Image (tube, rainbow, N blue to C red):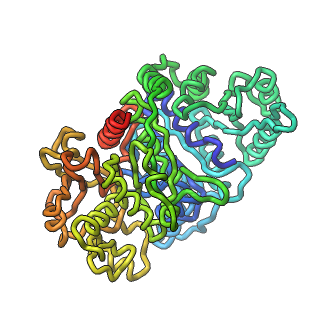
Amino acid sequence: MSGIGKGISTASIGRILKSKGFAVTAIKIDPYINVDAGTMNPTEHGEVFVLEDGYETDQDMGNYERFLDVTLPEINYITTGRVYLEVIRRERNLEYKGKNVEVVPDIPLEVIRRIEAASAEARADVTLIEIGGTIGEYQNIIFLEAARMLKLRKPDDVAIVMVSYVPIPGNIGEMKTKPTQYASRSLNSVGLQADVILARSAVPLDDKRKEKIAIFCNIPVERVISAPDVESIYDVPLNFERDGLGATLCGILGLPDRKTDLRAWKGFVRKSHTSRQELKIAIVGKYFDTGDFVLSDAYLSVIEAIKFSAAKLGKRAKITWVNSKNLEKKGVRVATVLGAFDGVIVPGGFGESGVEGKLVAIRFAREKKIPYFGLCYGMQLMVVEYARNVLGLPGANTTEIRKSAEDPVVDIMLEQKKHLANNKYGGTMRLGIYPAYLKKGTMARAAYKKELVEERHRHRYEINPQYVKRLEEAGLVFSGTSPDHVLMEIAELPRSVHPFMLGTQFHPELQARPLAPHPLFTAFLSAAVARKKRRK
């Protein structure tokens, strides 16, 4: 089933193999007709993770980068739409030399070509491939067929790992293996036999269940790996290694079973668990509602970036979701909602809904001197709030919300207006990595400890250059700019005015890693620590 942890399992296997000294890369296959993840609704699909080269991908690519501490290229992300688009392009260009082009074998062959190209580009000893979706679904059959053909071509170079849920029905109180047996047979029906089964469950598997899965799913018992719920996803590689997964995979793939060195990883996990002082952080956003449930995946990289910096400081972050739409309701006391927090984050987003609630939160954080961190849209709205309530421009707005704004302090990039006029929204933003120069004596420069930085972007709108001088004269500092000083990359208030009020046009969370926390998140949480001490 979806959400079972295939991405984390893949990333964890990668971490283990990398810790053995192997060069590892990872590929995500999504069975969507979408060419990329850029146009998918965050409340349905989760976060859009932007790669360094600007490609918009599934959030699992972020997990791979964080666990493996690598930068992945766009070739490592595959969708059904992208595969078909390329096959049709080649057919139209007569690259198939007039032969019939068929779903099988030509579509799976294109999948294999992409897998081999990604592996070659990374010079990988091991290439991990996660096939999205669920076994038995019609939509991922072409990828399972590609796996079958790849296994047939290179039987000793391919290992099939199946992740399956082992439930404990509440009214029975006994762990049931039948769903895993059924999943295994469904996999067999497409010509694949699992070499390893990762058994996801609420608690560790006992020997009896391991033996039952092994017998009925036709694998040795030592290849049934227990994958119970854990306190943190970063515990997963350590759990897998306790069951000897690394050695098992090395044996299947004919690789030397080198010693596993997870010392640095264990250190990070230990600090995450032993940090006791709690920092209360509010994330004020709108992508939370999915029926009666709360979806935090829309802000996955932000959450993880907070965790990494909190662990570095020896703290534990307690994150609370604040729906910005609720702050717009009459009679809501903002101080009651936000007053007890040590820090406030307004993350990225698009569209009009919930915006006024975010502006209310930003003003409260500024006036009450609560550490504030604005990410992309969170920076743009920080500038709008400052223009309205400090510069004295009540009609200030972003043209994303009000095209005819009296004072458009945030406006769309000129080169994008033509795209939008023609209803072209996919892949038309400022995407990927761009450089920024940091001014001396600013909080941003102090955090990074260098003049030039490179960060990943995903947006169409920018701070309007026509208002920059007036905003600066009113006290706002643009501490980071593009090399030509046209684009404003970081806005902040001086430390003498506010302990930490900073926004970035880019998404720093996309480059935060467990063993290399992002300096801006660390600076923000340091300010939150100071606020907590002051309040005590």
Taking the image as shown, residue 221 lies to the left or right of residue 68, namely right
Q: Quadrant of residue 32?
A: bottom right
Residue drawn 61% across and 41% down?
Answer: 5
Q: Residue at x 24, y 53 (%)?
A: 492
Q: Position of residue 510 (x, y in %)?
A: 39, 47
Q: In this image, 387 relative to 60: left or right? A: left
Q: In this picture, is 404 found above or below 446?
A: below
Q: Is residue 181 above or below residue 453?
A: above
Please tell me which residue is depicted at 24% across the width and 40% down the height of the picture: 447
* Coordinates of residue 237 in the picture (x, y in percent): 54, 28
Q: Is residue 233 left or right of residue 50?
A: right
Left or right: where does residue 109 sit relative to residue 136?
left
Q: Residue furthest right?
A: 172
The image shows residue 511 at horizontal and vertical percentages of 36, 44
**Screen quadrant of the C terminus:** top left
* Nearer-the-camera pick, 158 or 392: 392
Whole-percent x and y of residue 215?
81, 28
Query: Observer-nearest residue: 266 or 155?
Result: 266
Could one spot residue 61 in this view of the protein? yes
Give the total of numbered labels: 0
- Residue 265 visible somewhere in the drawing: no
Please determine whether, in this image, residue 168 is positioned above or below residue 147: above
